[in-house]
């Protein structure tokens, strides 16, 4: 046994803590330790999800707003009986974009 027998992991831990204290304050250190959550990507199926269609999906095939994947023949909402409400989304979009116009009333003479 030598005089300098020590645990390397403990030494590295002490050095890293010392460096972290010098570089980042405690508030930034707490924020840096939190990992941002990534949204889960939808699992892409290998085949078209339309009933009776067995076409193999390619890289350029389409994901619908109803969260299903379809081939080029069934990509349109009418072709696969889409459950997404396009009309309600369109109304919401128009109400947000269009300002309300109220005219001033004129006095009759």
Image: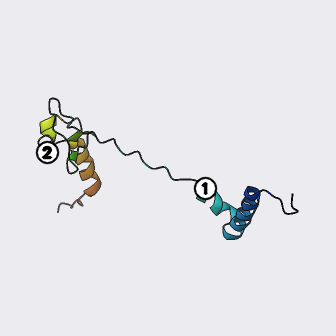
To which quarter of the image does residue 26 belong? bottom right
Disc 1 from disc 2: Cα separation = 44 Å
At numbered mark 1, what does the secondary structure look like: helix, strand or loop?
A: helix
To which quarter of the image does residue 66 belong? top left
Instruction: Point out the image quarter for the C terminus.
Output: bottom left
Which residue is depicted at the point 70% across and 63% down? 16
Give neighbour class at mark 1: few <14, some 14-19, many 20+ (Cα, 10 Å): few
Q: Residue furthest front?
A: 1
- Provide the residue designation for mark 1: 33
**Residue nearest the viewer, comparing 61 with 63:** 61
Is 49 placed left or right of 6 in the picture? left
At numbered mark 2, what does the secondary structure look like: helix, strand or loop?
A: loop
- Residue 100 visible, this orientation: no
To which quarter of the image does residue 82 belong? top left
Which residue is depicted at the point 78% across and 56% down? 7
Which residue is depicted at the point 73% across and 56% down? 9
- Provide the residue designation for mark 2: 72
Give neighbour class at mark 2: few <14, some 14-19, many 20+ (Cα, 10 Å): some
Say above or below: 91 vs 53. Answer: below
- In the rendering, at what x and y percent does residue 42 appear? 34, 43
- Residue 25 visible, this orientation: yes
- In the rendering, at what x and y percent does residue 24 appear? 66, 67
**Residue nearest the viewer, comparing 48 with 94:** 48
Instruction: Point out the image quarter for the N terminus.
Output: bottom right
Q: Earlier in the sequence, mark 1 or mark 2?
A: 1
């Amino acid at each position: 046994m030598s005089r300098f027998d020590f645990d390397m992991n403990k030494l590295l831990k002490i050095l890293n803590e010392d460096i972290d204290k010098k570089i980042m304050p405690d508030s930034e250190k707490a924020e840096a330790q939190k990992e941002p959550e990534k949204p889960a990507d939808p699992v892409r199926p290998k085949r078209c999800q339309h009933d009776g269609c067995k076409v193999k999906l390619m890289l350029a095939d389409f994901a619908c707003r109803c969260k299903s994947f379809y081939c080029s023949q069934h990509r349109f909402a009418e072709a696969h009986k889409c459950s997404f409400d396009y009309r309600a989304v369109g109304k919401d979009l128009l109400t947000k974009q269009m300002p309300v116009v109220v005219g001033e009333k004129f006095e009759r003479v």
